[in-house]
Amino acid sequence: MAASVHQQDAATGEISHNAGSAADGTKTVASDLSEVAGEVSEARVSAQTLLKACERVASVAEDLREEVESFLGKVAI
């Protein structure tokens, strides 16, 4: 009987240890996911800033193209 109780205690201890390890692992994963989410948010902001800059460059390039065509049209006459 004592041996059975000892085995049951050992099994319960092992289960408790494994549950604690799983909880620690879950905390680590949650922390890592939170960090990744923050970095993704920063990357999104950077991408939006880059997109706005590219759109502005395209607009300026179009304005310059129109100015050059207008100038060349006047010089060619």
Image (cartoon, grey):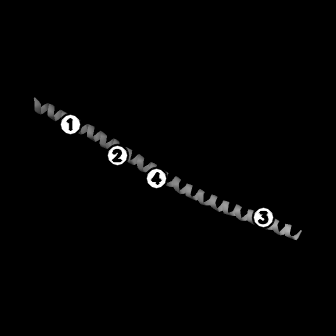
Q: Residue 73: image x %, image y %?
A: 15, 31
Q: How many C-alpha atoms fall within 10 Å of the one at disc 1: few (<14), some, or many (≥20)?
A: few
Q: What residue is drawn where x is 23% and y is 37%? A: 65
N-terminal label among 1 and 4: 4
Q: Which residue is mark 4?
A: 42
Q: Residue 42: image x %, image y %?
A: 46, 53
Q: Nearer the viewer, residue 7 or 63?
A: 7
Q: Which mark is residue 67?
A: 1
Name the element at disc 1.
helix
Cα separation between marks 1 and 3: 83 Å
Amino acid type, label 1? Glu
Q: Of circles 2 and 3, which is in front? A: 3
Name the element at disc 4.
helix
Q: Which residue is mark 2?
A: 53
Q: Residue 9: image x %, image y %?
A: 81, 67
Amino acid type, label 3? Ala
Which of the 4 image quadrants contains residue 52?
top left
**Quadrant the C terminus occupies:** top left
Q: Please report contact status of discs 1 and 3: CB closer than 8 Å, yes or no.
A: no
Q: Which residue is mark 3?
A: 11
Cα separation between marks 4 and 2: 17 Å
N-terminal label among 1 and 3: 3
Amino acid type, label 2? Ala
